[in-house]
Amino acid sequence: MLRCEVEAHGRAAIVHVAGEIDMSNAGEFALFLRRATAFGQHVIVNMTHVLYVDGRGLHALREAEHECQRRRRRLMVAGAVPIVRRVMGIVRLDEAIACVDSVEEALQVLRTVSNGAD
């Protein structure tokens, strides 16, 4: 079972995700990511409670990252468990999407970026 919600937080949309992301629900996950990118803000995907992600879920992340780039915004993954980070590394998604330990760290990165040139 997958649970997602989008929270507006200043200059970022935070997508809170819990459960497993697989072929049965990757479309739903992608829809929440599209909603978050539609805000025109930076996107933080809180994956602290994601236990598994398959290729379709990773594809949804990559598509959201491309949309953020198009809008000149950042997408970051926060709190991914080791197996999720490992899978992201295997497909080199971690080279395109910053992975940080927590939502708080992602917000700090965005504050740093905002103090420079956005």
Image (tube, helix red, strand yellow):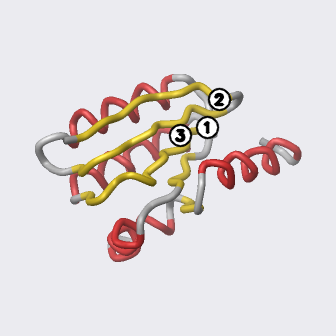
CA–CA distance in space, label 1 to label 3:
7 Å
- Vertical position of residue 61 compared to residue 94: above or below: above
| Quadrant of residue 82 within the rendered picture | bottom left
Residue at image position (41%, 29%) is: 5
Name the residue beneath numbered marker 3.
68
Residue at image position (83%, 45%) is: 117
Q: Amino acid at mark 3?
A: Cys
Q: Amino acid at mark 2?
A: His
Number of numbered discs on residues: 3
Q: Secondary structure at mark 3?
A: helix
Name the residue beneath numbered marker 2.
9
Residue at image position (48%, 45%) is: 45
Q: Name which of mark 1 and mark 3 comes first in the sequence.
A: 1
Q: Amino acid at mark 1?
A: His
Q: In the displayed orientation, state which residue is furthest to the right.
A: 115
Residue 80 placement, left or right of 102: left
Tell us which disc is closer to us: 2 or 1: 2
Q: Secondary structure at mark 2?
A: strand
Name the residue beneath numbered marker 1.
42
- Marks 1 and 2: in contact by CB < 8 Å? no
Q: Position of residue 24 (x, y in %)?
A: 11, 43
| Residue 118, label in figure | none
Q: Secondary structure at mark 1?
A: strand
Residue at image position (13%, 48%) is: 23
- Marks 3 and 1: in contact by CB < 8 Å? yes
Q: Position of residue 71 (x, y in %)?
A: 58, 34
Q: Badge 1, how many Cα within 10 Å: few under 14, some, many 20+?
A: many
